[in-house]
């Protein structure tokens, strides 16, 4: 009977935590997604670090350069492309595109290699040396995030609100294959997104984030990046240390291919956890607490199953029902969230969807049933991956191994 009560209390606790986080995000997105693009149009510098040629690279850059971010018929933004080396395939592709257009001021920065910080961070710091003196806002984006033509307007707009230190979009992984590794990453990604509506735990995402130049300077972000392996979470903690908020912008949610091998997904998950552990420990502690709670829940459920099989005592059946009552609620969240994210992703799509957009939409629509079936597997694997982050500070990122000794000390190993 003690185990039944304990399991029931754990289940109720998990339900309360998950329900609160889910409803907070759901209501926030419902409230924000229909808002028109703000009229706040400060001069901005868009910094785009590149490495290699991702699918649709040139098309994505054309969308970026065609952004509806202008006043009196003139663009209010510049784009600074940055690569580690002129030998990078992206270097020639970018310069070819730059030669074809004259509407937007662009520049190219070759950052070189620095083994004391992540290459992406090194590229960004090098690009910051070339921003225009009249730029008021820094926008950091990845090459594949631009979809809607008012992306910059939505991302920059909330910076005009009191107390907002940075704004951010987020990536939404869609598993095309629908295999277990890809489904697990998608589910991890969905649950992490629940934090984005929380003033306490919301964090900047490096694929699309914006910050006022003055805030960037006052928060000493460049100094924090000097020997860092991470750009977004270190920016998050720098901004929050000033008492400012990170504001999630649903209009800047980006759909991405989420397929990957088991090794790739484990490597990716480990990287997210270790970066969070080092650069945003408050959020990592929250993840660890949740992992311990769900691990104990899983142990109690499995123990109830074994005890029921061995003894046949109905008390263990009651214990099992008490624990498994969590699953139907999670299924409800999954179905409800599917409808919400579908609306958001469709709203963020360009007016004339490309073949790739339609393929992405079809994959998203097909994944619901498989995601539902993956919930038990997620309870088995994801807490284990989370707890593993207690044992290491090593990550692998784009083929490079890093040891994260502290927020200000990164070693390439």
Image (cartoon, grey):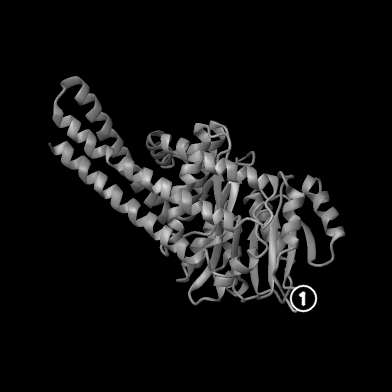
Question: Which residue is more in the foreground, 316 or 81?
Answer: 316
Residue under label 1: 73
Q: Position of residue 230 (x, y in %)?
A: 57, 53
- Residue 231 seen in the figure: no
Q: Is residue 227 left or right of residue 82?
A: left
Could you tell me which quadrant the N terminus lies in? top left
For numbered disc 1, what is the local secondary structure?
loop
The residue lying furthest to the bottom in this view is 72
Q: Position of residue 268 (x, y in %)?
A: 54, 41
Q: Residue at x 69, y 53 (%)?
A: 143
Question: Which residue is more in the foreground, 68 or 335?
Answer: 335
Q: Is residue 107 left or right of residue 222?
A: right
Q: Residue at x 37, y 57 (%)?
A: 23
Q: Residues within 10 Å of mark 1 (few under 14, many from 20)?
A: few
Q: Quadrant of residue 79?
A: bottom right
Picture layout, residue 57 above or below residue 72: above
Picture layout, residue 412 above or below residue 344: above
The residue lying furthest to the right in this view is 99
Q: Residue at x 21, y 46 (%)?
A: 9
Q: Quadrant of residue 69?
A: bottom right
Q: Position of residue 234 (x, y in %)?
A: 53, 58
- Residue 207 seen in the figure: yes
Q: Residue at x 54, y 69 (%)?
A: 35
The residue lying furthest to the front in this view is 352
Could you tell me which quadrant the C terminus lies in? top right
Q: Quadrant of residue 132?
A: bottom right
């Amino acid at each position: 009977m003690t185990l039944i009560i304990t399991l029931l209390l754990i289940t109720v606790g998990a339900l309360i935590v998950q329900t609160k986080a889910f409803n907070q995000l759901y209501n926030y997105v419902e409230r924000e997604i229909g808002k028109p693009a703000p009229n706040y149009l400060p001069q901005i510098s868009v910094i785009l670090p590149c490495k290699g040629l991702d699918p649709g690279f040139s098309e994505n850059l054309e969308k970026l350069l065609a952004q509806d971010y202008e006043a009196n018929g003139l663009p209010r933004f510049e784009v600074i492309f940055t690569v580690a080396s002129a030998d990078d395939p992206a270097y020639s592709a970018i310069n070819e595109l730059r030669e074809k257009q004259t509407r937007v001021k662009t520049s190219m920065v070759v950052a070189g290699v620095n083994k004391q910080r992540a290459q992406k961070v090194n590229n960004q710091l090098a690009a910051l040396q070339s921003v225009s003196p009249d730029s008021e806002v820094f926008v950091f984006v990845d090459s594949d995030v631009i979809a809607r033509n008012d992306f910059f307007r939505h991302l920059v707009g909330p910076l005009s609100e009191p107390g907002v230190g940075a704004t951010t979009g987020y990536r939404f992984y869609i598993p095309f294959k629908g295999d277990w590794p890809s489904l697990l990453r998608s589910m991890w990604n969905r649950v992490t997104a629940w934090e984005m509506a929380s003033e306490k735990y919301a964090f900047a995402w490096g694929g699309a984030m914006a910050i006022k130049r003055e805030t960037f300077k006052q928060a000493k972000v460049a100094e924090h990046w000097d020997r860092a392996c991470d750009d977004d979470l270190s920016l998050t903690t720098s901004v929050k240390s000033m008492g400012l908020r990170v504001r999630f912008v649903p209009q800047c949610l980006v759909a991405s291919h989420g397929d990957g091998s088991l090794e790739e997904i484990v490597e990716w998950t480990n990287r997210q956890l270790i970066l969070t552990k080092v650069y945003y420990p408050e959020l990592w502690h929250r993840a660890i607490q949740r992992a311990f709670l769900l691990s104990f829940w899983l142990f109690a459920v499995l123990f109830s199953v074994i005890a029921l099989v061995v003894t046949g005592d109905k008390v263990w059946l009651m214990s099992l029902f008490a624990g498994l009552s969590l699953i139907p609620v999670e299924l409800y969240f999954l179905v409800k969230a599917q409808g919400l994210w579908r609306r958001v992703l469709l709203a963020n799509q360009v007016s004339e969807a490309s073949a790739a957009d339609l393929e992405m939409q079809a994959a998203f629509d097909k994944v619901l049933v498989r995601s539902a079936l993956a919930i038990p597997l997620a309870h088995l694997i994801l807490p284990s991956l989370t707890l593993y982050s207690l044992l290491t500070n090593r990550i692998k990122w784009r083929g490079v191994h890093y040891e994260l000794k502290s927020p200000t000390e990164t070693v390439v190993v």
